[in-house]
Amino acid sequence: MASSTNKSKKLRVLLIPFFASSHIGPFTDLAISLATASPQAVEATIAVTPANVSIVQSLLQRRCEHVGTPVAVKVVTYPFPAVDGLPKGVENLGKAAQADAWRIDVAAISDTLMRPAQEALIRAQSPDALVTDVHFLWNAGIADELGVPCVTFNVIGAFSTLAMRHLAESEPGEAVSTIPRFPAPEIRIPRNELPEYFSSQDQADYSPFDRLYAVQGDCFGLAVNTAFDLEEHYCGMYVRNGYAKRAYMVGPLSLRSSPPARAEHSPCIEWLDSKPSRSVVYLCFGSLAHVSDAQLDELARGLECSGKTFLWVVRSETWSPPEGWQERVRDRGLLVTAWAPQTAILGHPAVGAFVTHCGWNSVLETVAAGVPVLTWPIVFEQFITERLLTEVLGIGERLWPDGAGVRSTRYEENEMIPTEAVASALTTFMEPGGPGEVARGRVLDLAAKVHAAVAEGGSSDRDLHRLIHDLMEARGAAGGTT
Protein backbone atom coordinates (compact mmCIF):
# COMPACT_ATOMS: atom_id res chain seq x y z
CA MET A 1 0.00 0.00 0.00
CA ALA A 2 1.28 3.47 -0.82
CA SER A 3 2.19 5.67 2.11
CA SER A 4 0.11 8.71 3.05
CA THR A 5 2.97 10.87 1.78
CA ASN A 6 2.73 9.22 -1.63
CA LYS A 7 -1.03 9.55 -1.68
CA SER A 8 -0.78 13.31 -1.34
CA LYS A 9 1.94 13.62 -3.97
CA LYS A 10 0.91 15.59 -7.06
CA LEU A 11 0.83 14.03 -10.51
CA ARG A 12 3.99 15.40 -12.14
CA VAL A 13 3.51 15.88 -15.88
CA LEU A 14 6.45 16.76 -18.15
CA LEU A 15 5.60 18.36 -21.53
CA ILE A 16 8.10 18.58 -24.43
CA PRO A 17 7.14 20.67 -27.49
CA PHE A 18 8.76 20.99 -30.92
CA PHE A 19 10.95 24.02 -31.74
CA ALA A 20 8.32 26.39 -33.14
CA SER A 21 6.22 29.03 -31.41
CA SER A 22 3.12 27.47 -33.01
CA HIS A 23 3.88 24.33 -30.97
CA ILE A 24 5.33 25.90 -27.82
CA GLY A 25 2.20 28.06 -27.41
CA PRO A 26 -0.34 25.18 -27.33
CA PHE A 27 1.97 23.06 -25.15
CA THR A 28 2.21 25.94 -22.67
CA ASP A 29 -1.57 26.35 -22.81
CA LEU A 30 -1.96 22.63 -22.09
CA ALA A 31 0.47 22.86 -19.17
CA ILE A 32 -1.49 25.80 -17.76
CA SER A 33 -4.79 23.96 -18.29
CA LEU A 34 -3.57 20.81 -16.53
CA ALA A 35 -2.21 22.81 -13.59
CA THR A 36 -5.29 24.98 -13.16
CA ALA A 37 -7.90 22.26 -13.78
CA SER A 38 -6.66 20.32 -10.74
CA PRO A 39 -4.26 22.63 -8.87
CA GLN A 40 -4.12 20.35 -5.82
CA ALA A 41 -3.45 17.25 -7.90
CA VAL A 42 -1.26 18.21 -10.88
CA GLU A 43 2.18 19.77 -11.25
CA ALA A 44 3.04 20.64 -14.86
CA THR A 45 6.55 21.24 -16.17
CA ILE A 46 7.37 22.34 -19.72
CA ALA A 47 10.78 21.51 -21.18
CA VAL A 48 12.34 23.71 -23.87
CA THR A 49 15.80 24.64 -25.11
CA PRO A 50 17.36 27.84 -23.67
CA ALA A 51 16.50 30.12 -26.61
CA ASN A 52 12.81 29.19 -26.32
CA VAL A 53 12.40 29.91 -22.60
CA SER A 54 11.30 33.50 -23.19
CA ILE A 55 8.34 32.32 -25.29
CA VAL A 56 7.03 30.19 -22.44
CA GLN A 57 7.71 32.86 -19.83
CA SER A 58 5.84 35.48 -21.86
CA LEU A 59 2.78 33.24 -22.10
CA LEU A 60 2.90 32.42 -18.40
CA GLN A 61 3.28 36.12 -17.53
CA ARG A 62 0.21 37.08 -19.55
CA ARG A 63 -1.77 34.37 -17.79
CA CYS A 64 -0.56 35.55 -14.37
CA GLU A 65 -1.60 39.11 -15.14
CA HIS A 66 -5.04 37.84 -16.18
CA VAL A 67 -5.80 35.74 -13.10
CA GLY A 68 -3.83 37.85 -10.63
CA THR A 69 -1.88 34.90 -9.19
CA PRO A 70 1.16 32.92 -10.36
CA VAL A 71 0.51 29.90 -12.56
CA ALA A 72 1.98 26.71 -11.14
CA VAL A 73 3.88 25.70 -14.27
CA LYS A 74 7.61 25.07 -14.07
CA VAL A 75 10.07 25.58 -16.93
CA VAL A 76 13.15 23.40 -17.36
CA THR A 77 15.73 23.40 -20.14
CA TYR A 78 17.85 20.96 -22.08
CA PRO A 79 20.57 21.84 -24.61
CA PHE A 80 19.84 22.24 -28.31
CA PRO A 81 22.42 20.21 -30.24
CA ALA A 82 25.07 21.68 -32.50
CA VAL A 83 23.70 21.39 -36.05
CA ASP A 84 25.89 21.84 -39.11
CA GLY A 85 25.06 25.08 -40.91
CA LEU A 86 22.76 26.39 -38.16
CA PRO A 87 24.00 29.45 -36.23
CA LYS A 88 24.40 28.94 -32.48
CA GLY A 89 21.33 30.17 -30.59
CA VAL A 90 18.90 29.55 -33.48
CA GLU A 91 16.58 27.01 -31.87
CA ASN A 92 13.18 27.97 -33.28
CA LEU A 93 11.78 27.74 -36.82
CA GLY A 94 10.62 31.34 -36.56
CA LYS A 95 14.19 32.51 -35.96
CA ALA A 96 15.81 30.42 -38.69
CA ALA A 97 16.53 31.77 -42.15
CA GLN A 98 14.22 30.25 -44.75
CA ALA A 99 17.12 28.26 -46.21
CA ASP A 100 18.01 26.84 -42.75
CA ALA A 101 14.58 25.86 -41.43
CA TRP A 102 14.97 22.29 -42.70
CA ARG A 103 18.01 21.88 -40.47
CA ILE A 104 15.82 22.27 -37.37
CA ASP A 105 13.27 19.80 -38.76
CA VAL A 106 15.99 17.21 -39.44
CA ALA A 107 17.61 17.71 -36.03
CA ALA A 108 14.26 17.37 -34.26
CA ILE A 109 13.66 13.83 -35.51
CA SER A 110 17.27 12.68 -35.15
CA ASP A 111 17.90 9.94 -32.60
CA THR A 112 21.58 10.87 -32.73
CA LEU A 113 21.26 14.65 -32.28
CA MET A 114 18.12 15.15 -30.20
CA ARG A 115 17.42 12.00 -28.20
CA PRO A 116 20.40 12.08 -25.79
CA ALA A 117 19.56 15.48 -24.28
CA GLN A 118 15.83 14.77 -24.07
CA GLU A 119 16.37 11.33 -22.56
CA ALA A 120 18.76 12.71 -19.95
CA LEU A 121 16.21 15.36 -19.00
CA ILE A 122 13.31 12.91 -18.78
CA ARG A 123 15.27 10.51 -16.60
CA ALA A 124 16.45 13.35 -14.36
CA GLN A 125 12.93 14.75 -13.98
CA SER A 126 11.43 11.27 -13.46
CA PRO A 127 7.87 12.44 -14.19
CA ASP A 128 4.68 10.51 -13.49
CA ALA A 129 3.51 11.17 -17.07
CA LEU A 130 5.03 12.47 -20.28
CA VAL A 131 3.31 14.61 -22.93
CA THR A 132 5.43 14.75 -26.08
CA ASP A 133 5.26 16.39 -29.47
CA VAL A 134 4.84 13.99 -32.38
CA HIS A 135 8.38 14.64 -33.69
CA PHE A 136 10.12 12.95 -30.76
CA LEU A 137 9.27 9.32 -31.45
CA TRP A 138 11.79 7.94 -28.92
CA ASN A 139 10.02 9.51 -25.94
CA ALA A 140 7.31 6.85 -25.90
CA GLY A 141 9.98 4.16 -25.49
CA ILE A 142 11.76 6.11 -22.75
CA ALA A 143 8.46 6.54 -20.89
CA ASP A 144 7.79 2.82 -21.26
CA GLU A 145 11.18 1.99 -19.76
CA LEU A 146 10.38 4.27 -16.82
CA GLY A 147 6.96 2.69 -16.43
CA VAL A 148 5.03 5.95 -16.93
CA PRO A 149 2.30 6.79 -19.48
CA CYS A 150 3.19 8.77 -22.60
CA VAL A 151 0.64 10.95 -24.39
CA THR A 152 1.34 12.44 -27.80
CA PHE A 153 -0.13 15.89 -28.32
CA ASN A 154 -1.26 17.08 -31.74
CA VAL A 155 -1.21 20.87 -32.00
CA ILE A 156 -2.96 20.54 -35.40
CA GLY A 157 -6.61 19.56 -35.69
CA ALA A 158 -8.11 16.15 -36.42
CA PHE A 159 -9.19 16.83 -40.02
CA SER A 160 -5.73 17.69 -41.33
CA THR A 161 -3.74 15.10 -39.37
CA LEU A 162 -6.14 12.30 -40.33
CA ALA A 163 -6.20 13.45 -43.97
CA MET A 164 -2.40 13.25 -44.12
CA ARG A 165 -2.44 9.80 -42.53
CA HIS A 166 -5.06 8.44 -44.93
CA LEU A 167 -3.23 9.90 -47.93
CA ALA A 168 0.12 8.50 -46.74
CA GLU A 169 -1.43 5.04 -46.41
CA SER A 170 -2.92 5.17 -49.92
CA GLU A 171 -1.23 4.60 -53.26
CA PRO A 172 0.26 7.81 -54.72
CA GLY A 173 -0.99 8.47 -58.20
CA GLU A 174 -3.23 11.12 -59.65
CA ALA A 175 -2.30 14.80 -59.85
CA VAL A 176 -5.41 15.48 -57.76
CA SER A 177 -5.96 13.23 -54.75
CA THR A 178 -9.22 12.36 -53.04
CA ILE A 179 -8.79 11.85 -49.30
CA PRO A 180 -9.77 8.22 -48.71
CA ARG A 181 -12.01 6.93 -45.93
CA PHE A 182 -13.41 10.36 -45.08
CA PRO A 183 -17.10 11.15 -44.62
CA ALA A 184 -18.90 13.43 -47.09
CA PRO A 185 -18.20 15.88 -48.57
CA GLU A 186 -15.54 14.36 -50.82
CA ILE A 187 -12.30 16.27 -50.33
CA ARG A 188 -10.01 16.62 -53.36
CA ILE A 189 -6.62 18.31 -53.29
CA PRO A 190 -3.82 18.65 -55.88
CA ARG A 191 -0.62 16.83 -54.98
CA ASN A 192 1.37 20.08 -55.17
CA GLU A 193 -0.81 21.52 -52.36
CA LEU A 194 0.13 18.66 -50.03
CA PRO A 195 3.19 18.65 -47.73
CA GLU A 196 6.33 18.16 -49.78
CA TYR A 197 7.01 14.55 -48.78
CA PHE A 198 3.87 13.52 -50.72
CA SER A 199 5.59 14.69 -53.91
CA SER A 200 8.58 12.42 -53.36
CA GLN A 201 8.89 9.10 -55.13
CA ASP A 202 11.29 7.91 -52.42
CA GLN A 203 9.49 5.57 -50.04
CA ALA A 204 12.10 6.45 -47.38
CA ASP A 205 10.47 9.87 -47.04
CA TYR A 206 7.42 8.12 -45.58
CA SER A 207 9.33 6.01 -43.04
CA PRO A 208 9.22 8.59 -40.18
CA PHE A 209 5.46 8.74 -40.58
CA ASP A 210 5.13 4.97 -40.52
CA ARG A 211 7.05 5.04 -37.23
CA LEU A 212 4.93 7.93 -35.95
CA TYR A 213 1.67 6.09 -36.59
CA ALA A 214 3.01 2.93 -34.94
CA VAL A 215 4.19 4.88 -31.88
CA GLN A 216 0.89 6.76 -31.57
CA GLY A 217 -1.00 3.48 -31.65
CA ASP A 218 1.17 2.07 -28.85
CA CYS A 219 1.12 5.20 -26.67
CA PHE A 220 -1.11 5.55 -23.63
CA GLY A 221 -3.18 8.13 -25.50
CA LEU A 222 -3.42 11.06 -27.87
CA ALA A 223 -4.49 14.62 -27.03
CA VAL A 224 -5.61 17.02 -29.76
CA ASN A 225 -6.01 20.80 -29.62
CA THR A 226 -9.53 20.80 -31.01
CA ALA A 227 -13.14 20.53 -29.88
CA PHE A 228 -15.51 17.73 -30.76
CA ASP A 229 -18.17 20.15 -32.05
CA LEU A 230 -15.64 21.76 -34.39
CA GLU A 231 -14.53 18.49 -36.03
CA GLU A 232 -17.21 16.07 -34.91
CA HIS A 233 -17.10 13.85 -38.02
CA TYR A 234 -13.36 13.23 -37.58
CA CYS A 235 -12.57 13.16 -33.84
CA GLY A 236 -14.07 9.71 -33.34
CA MET A 237 -11.81 8.16 -35.98
CA TYR A 238 -8.76 8.00 -33.69
CA VAL A 239 -10.11 5.30 -31.39
CA ARG A 240 -12.66 3.80 -33.80
CA ASN A 241 -9.99 3.12 -36.45
CA GLY A 242 -7.42 1.90 -33.93
CA TYR A 243 -5.11 4.90 -34.37
CA ALA A 244 -4.99 5.57 -30.61
CA LYS A 245 -5.91 3.69 -27.45
CA ARG A 246 -7.45 6.80 -25.93
CA ALA A 247 -8.17 10.20 -27.49
CA TYR A 248 -8.75 13.49 -25.70
CA MET A 249 -10.14 16.54 -27.55
CA VAL A 250 -9.05 19.30 -25.16
CA GLY A 251 -9.20 22.51 -27.21
CA PRO A 252 -9.25 25.29 -28.03
CA LEU A 253 -6.69 25.51 -25.23
CA SER A 254 -6.05 29.22 -25.86
CA LEU A 255 -9.59 29.94 -24.69
CA ARG A 256 -8.70 28.51 -21.29
CA SER A 257 -5.34 30.15 -20.77
CA SER A 258 -5.51 33.54 -22.53
CA PRO A 259 -6.94 36.74 -21.08
CA PRO A 260 -10.21 38.00 -22.58
CA ALA A 261 -9.76 39.71 -25.93
CA ARG A 262 -10.74 43.15 -24.66
CA ALA A 263 -8.17 42.91 -21.83
CA GLU A 264 -5.39 43.72 -24.32
CA HIS A 265 -4.23 47.31 -24.77
CA SER A 266 -2.09 48.20 -27.76
CA PRO A 267 -1.93 50.72 -30.61
CA CYS A 268 -3.72 48.15 -32.80
CA ILE A 269 -6.69 48.02 -30.44
CA GLU A 270 -6.80 51.79 -30.06
CA TRP A 271 -6.84 52.12 -33.86
CA LEU A 272 -9.64 49.55 -34.16
CA ASP A 273 -11.66 51.44 -31.55
CA SER A 274 -12.07 54.26 -34.09
CA LYS A 275 -13.52 51.99 -36.82
CA PRO A 276 -17.14 50.97 -37.49
CA SER A 277 -18.37 47.49 -36.61
CA ARG A 278 -17.24 44.68 -38.95
CA SER A 279 -15.58 47.12 -41.35
CA VAL A 280 -11.93 46.03 -41.03
CA VAL A 281 -10.13 43.27 -42.91
CA TYR A 282 -7.38 41.74 -40.75
CA LEU A 283 -4.45 40.06 -42.53
CA CYS A 284 -1.70 37.92 -40.98
CA PHE A 285 0.24 34.93 -42.32
CA GLY A 286 1.70 33.61 -39.07
CA SER A 287 5.25 33.26 -37.82
CA LEU A 288 6.61 30.68 -40.27
CA ALA A 289 5.12 31.40 -43.69
CA HIS A 290 7.38 33.08 -46.24
CA VAL A 291 5.79 35.43 -48.79
CA SER A 292 7.96 36.99 -51.51
CA ASP A 293 8.49 40.73 -51.68
CA ALA A 294 6.86 40.77 -55.13
CA GLN A 295 3.76 39.03 -53.76
CA LEU A 296 3.60 41.46 -50.84
CA ASP A 297 3.64 44.30 -53.39
CA GLU A 298 0.64 42.76 -55.20
CA LEU A 299 -1.18 42.31 -51.90
CA ALA A 300 -0.48 45.91 -50.89
CA ARG A 301 -1.85 47.22 -54.19
CA GLY A 302 -4.86 44.91 -53.89
CA LEU A 303 -5.68 46.30 -50.48
CA GLU A 304 -5.38 49.80 -51.88
CA CYS A 305 -7.60 49.06 -54.88
CA SER A 306 -10.25 47.33 -52.77
CA GLY A 307 -11.08 50.51 -50.88
CA LYS A 308 -11.53 48.45 -47.70
CA THR A 309 -10.25 49.36 -44.26
CA PHE A 310 -7.50 46.97 -43.18
CA LEU A 311 -5.06 46.01 -40.43
CA TRP A 312 -2.13 44.11 -41.92
CA VAL A 313 0.60 42.35 -39.93
CA VAL A 314 3.72 41.81 -42.07
CA ARG A 315 6.78 39.88 -40.92
CA SER A 316 9.54 40.55 -43.44
CA GLU A 317 13.07 41.85 -43.03
CA THR A 318 13.44 42.80 -46.70
CA TRP A 319 10.11 44.21 -47.88
CA SER A 320 8.98 47.81 -47.86
CA PRO A 321 5.67 49.07 -49.29
CA PRO A 322 5.43 50.46 -52.84
CA GLU A 323 6.41 54.12 -53.12
CA GLY A 324 3.67 56.42 -51.88
CA TRP A 325 1.46 53.53 -50.78
CA GLN A 326 1.39 54.30 -47.07
CA GLU A 327 0.47 57.91 -47.75
CA ARG A 328 -2.39 56.86 -50.05
CA VAL A 329 -3.92 54.37 -47.57
CA ARG A 330 -3.08 56.11 -44.28
CA ASP A 331 -6.73 57.03 -43.53
CA ARG A 332 -7.96 53.44 -43.75
CA GLY A 333 -4.97 51.14 -43.35
CA LEU A 334 -2.67 50.16 -40.48
CA LEU A 335 0.56 48.32 -41.30
CA VAL A 336 2.13 46.46 -38.35
CA THR A 337 5.66 45.07 -38.62
CA ALA A 338 6.06 43.91 -35.01
CA TRP A 339 4.18 41.42 -32.86
CA ALA A 340 0.44 42.07 -32.73
CA PRO A 341 -2.17 40.79 -30.21
CA GLN A 342 -4.04 38.58 -32.66
CA THR A 343 -6.59 37.19 -30.19
CA ALA A 344 -7.56 40.71 -29.15
CA ILE A 345 -7.65 41.92 -32.75
CA LEU A 346 -9.95 39.10 -33.86
CA GLY A 347 -12.13 39.68 -30.82
CA HIS A 348 -12.60 43.38 -31.63
CA PRO A 349 -16.07 44.24 -33.01
CA ALA A 350 -14.54 46.34 -35.80
CA VAL A 351 -13.00 43.26 -37.48
CA GLY A 352 -15.22 41.82 -40.21
CA ALA A 353 -12.94 39.30 -41.95
CA PHE A 354 -9.60 37.56 -41.54
CA VAL A 355 -7.22 36.81 -44.43
CA THR A 356 -5.39 33.81 -42.99
CA HIS A 357 -2.71 31.29 -43.92
CA CYS A 358 -4.86 28.60 -42.24
CA GLY A 359 -2.40 27.80 -39.48
CA TRP A 360 -4.30 25.82 -36.84
CA ASN A 361 -3.78 28.27 -33.98
CA SER A 362 -5.17 31.08 -36.15
CA VAL A 363 -8.11 28.88 -37.15
CA LEU A 364 -9.01 28.23 -33.50
CA GLU A 365 -8.70 31.94 -32.67
CA THR A 366 -10.90 33.12 -35.54
CA VAL A 367 -13.52 30.47 -34.79
CA ALA A 368 -13.55 31.46 -31.11
CA ALA A 369 -13.96 35.12 -32.13
CA GLY A 370 -16.69 34.38 -34.70
CA VAL A 371 -14.82 36.02 -37.61
CA PRO A 372 -15.20 34.59 -41.16
CA VAL A 373 -12.12 33.96 -43.29
CA LEU A 374 -10.59 34.41 -46.70
CA THR A 375 -7.99 31.67 -47.05
CA TRP A 376 -4.43 32.07 -48.32
CA PRO A 377 -2.58 28.84 -47.35
CA ILE A 378 1.18 28.72 -47.86
CA VAL A 379 2.96 25.71 -46.34
CA PHE A 380 2.71 22.36 -44.53
CA GLU A 381 -0.86 21.15 -43.94
CA GLN A 382 -2.46 24.57 -44.50
CA PHE A 383 -4.00 23.72 -47.88
CA ILE A 384 -5.71 20.73 -46.27
CA THR A 385 -7.01 22.84 -43.39
CA GLU A 386 -8.37 25.28 -45.96
CA ARG A 387 -10.74 22.53 -47.17
CA LEU A 388 -12.10 22.11 -43.63
CA LEU A 389 -12.87 25.83 -43.43
CA THR A 390 -14.33 26.32 -46.89
CA GLU A 391 -15.84 22.97 -47.87
CA VAL A 392 -16.82 21.33 -44.57
CA LEU A 393 -17.54 24.14 -42.09
CA GLY A 394 -18.40 26.81 -44.65
CA ILE A 395 -16.94 29.64 -42.59
CA GLY A 396 -15.06 31.32 -45.43
CA GLU A 397 -13.89 31.24 -49.02
CA ARG A 398 -10.64 30.90 -50.93
CA LEU A 399 -9.13 34.29 -51.68
CA TRP A 400 -7.86 32.99 -55.02
CA PRO A 401 -10.62 30.86 -56.62
CA ASP A 402 -10.04 27.26 -57.67
CA GLY A 403 -8.48 27.15 -61.12
CA ALA A 404 -7.27 30.76 -61.10
CA GLY A 405 -3.61 29.73 -60.85
CA VAL A 406 -1.07 27.33 -59.40
CA ARG A 407 -0.65 27.18 -55.64
CA SER A 408 1.91 24.95 -53.95
CA THR A 409 3.58 24.14 -50.66
CA ARG A 410 6.84 24.52 -52.62
CA TYR A 411 7.69 28.20 -52.55
CA GLU A 412 9.22 28.24 -56.03
CA GLU A 413 6.13 26.69 -57.70
CA ASN A 414 3.59 29.30 -56.59
CA GLU A 415 2.11 31.65 -59.16
CA MET A 416 1.67 35.27 -58.14
CA ILE A 417 -1.79 36.22 -56.87
CA PRO A 418 -2.36 39.48 -58.75
CA THR A 419 -3.57 42.83 -57.44
CA GLU A 420 -6.92 42.48 -59.21
CA ALA A 421 -7.67 39.10 -57.61
CA VAL A 422 -6.93 40.45 -54.13
CA ALA A 423 -9.11 43.52 -54.61
CA SER A 424 -11.98 41.52 -56.12
CA ALA A 425 -11.97 38.91 -53.34
CA LEU A 426 -12.03 41.55 -50.61
CA THR A 427 -14.79 43.67 -52.09
CA THR A 428 -17.01 40.67 -52.87
CA PHE A 429 -16.54 39.03 -49.48
CA MET A 430 -17.15 42.23 -47.52
CA GLU A 431 -20.17 43.57 -49.42
CA PRO A 432 -23.49 43.73 -47.52
CA GLY A 433 -25.43 40.49 -47.94
CA GLY A 434 -22.38 38.88 -49.57
CA PRO A 435 -20.59 35.62 -48.86
CA GLY A 436 -18.89 37.07 -45.81
CA GLU A 437 -22.21 37.53 -44.04
CA VAL A 438 -23.28 33.97 -44.82
CA ALA A 439 -19.97 32.63 -43.48
CA ARG A 440 -20.27 34.85 -40.40
CA GLY A 441 -23.54 33.21 -39.42
CA ARG A 442 -21.90 29.78 -39.47
CA VAL A 443 -18.75 30.82 -37.61
CA LEU A 444 -20.75 32.58 -34.90
CA ASP A 445 -22.62 29.33 -34.32
CA LEU A 446 -19.29 27.48 -34.04
CA ALA A 447 -17.94 30.18 -31.71
CA ALA A 448 -20.75 29.48 -29.25
CA LYS A 449 -20.00 25.77 -29.44
CA VAL A 450 -16.25 26.00 -28.80
CA HIS A 451 -16.77 28.40 -25.90
CA ALA A 452 -19.26 25.92 -24.43
CA ALA A 453 -16.77 23.08 -25.00
CA VAL A 454 -14.09 24.60 -22.75
CA ALA A 455 -16.56 25.86 -20.12
CA GLU A 456 -17.10 23.76 -17.01
CA GLY A 457 -18.82 20.54 -18.01
CA GLY A 458 -18.27 21.07 -21.74
CA SER A 459 -16.85 18.35 -23.98
CA SER A 460 -13.26 19.65 -23.96
CA ASP A 461 -13.39 20.34 -20.23
CA ARG A 462 -14.59 16.79 -19.62
CA ASP A 463 -11.82 15.37 -21.81
CA LEU A 464 -9.19 17.41 -19.99
CA HIS A 465 -10.36 16.07 -16.63
CA ARG A 466 -10.63 12.55 -18.12
CA LEU A 467 -7.00 12.87 -19.23
CA ILE A 468 -5.92 13.85 -15.71
CA HIS A 469 -8.01 11.06 -14.18
CA ASP A 470 -6.63 8.42 -16.57
CA LEU A 471 -3.03 9.50 -15.93
CA MET A 472 -3.58 9.32 -12.18
CA GLU A 473 -5.18 5.89 -12.56
CA ALA A 474 -2.16 4.75 -14.58
CA ARG A 475 0.18 5.97 -11.86
CA GLY A 476 -1.81 4.09 -9.27
CA ALA A 477 -1.79 0.92 -11.36
CA ALA A 478 1.98 1.21 -11.71
CA GLY A 479 2.35 1.20 -7.93
CA GLY A 480 2.54 4.93 -7.37
CA THR A 481 -0.31 6.93 -5.86
CA THR A 482 -4.02 7.08 -6.41
Image (cartoon, helix red, strand yellow):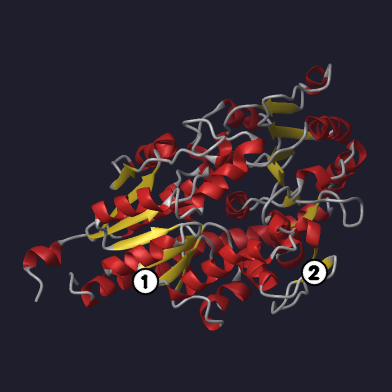
Which image quarter is the C terminus in?
Answer: bottom left
User: Is residue 29 shown left or right of residue 421?
Assistant: left
Report the residue marked by disc 1.
466
- Res 445 quadrant in image: bottom right
User: Is residue 465 shown left or right of residue 331?
Assistant: left
Is 147 above or below relative to 316? Answer: below
Sequence-earlier tag: 1 or 2: 2
Residue at coordinates 46% horizontally, 57% vertically from top-left? 136
Observer-nearest of 338 and 254: 338
Which image quarter is the N terminus in?
Answer: bottom left
What's the residue type where badge 1 is placed? Arg
Report the residue marked by disc 2.
177
Observer-nearest of 414 and 114: 114
Say whether residue 14 is visible: yes
How far across and how far down the image is residue 379, in percent?
A: 70, 49
How far across and how far down the image is residue 273, in percent?
A: 62, 31
How far across and how far down the image is residue 405, in percent?
A: 90, 50
Secondary structure of the residue carrying numbered label 2: strand
Mark in the foreground, 1 or 2: 2
Residue at coordinates 26% horizontally, 63% vertically from top-left? 128
Number of other residues with Cα within 10 Å of mark 1, as a class: few under 14, some 14 to 19, many 20 or more: some
User: Is residue 281 shown left or right of residue 54?
Assistant: right
- Res 325 quadrant in image: top right
Residue at coordinates 39% horizontally, 42% vertically from top-left? 63
Alpha carbon distance from label 1 to label 2: 37 Å
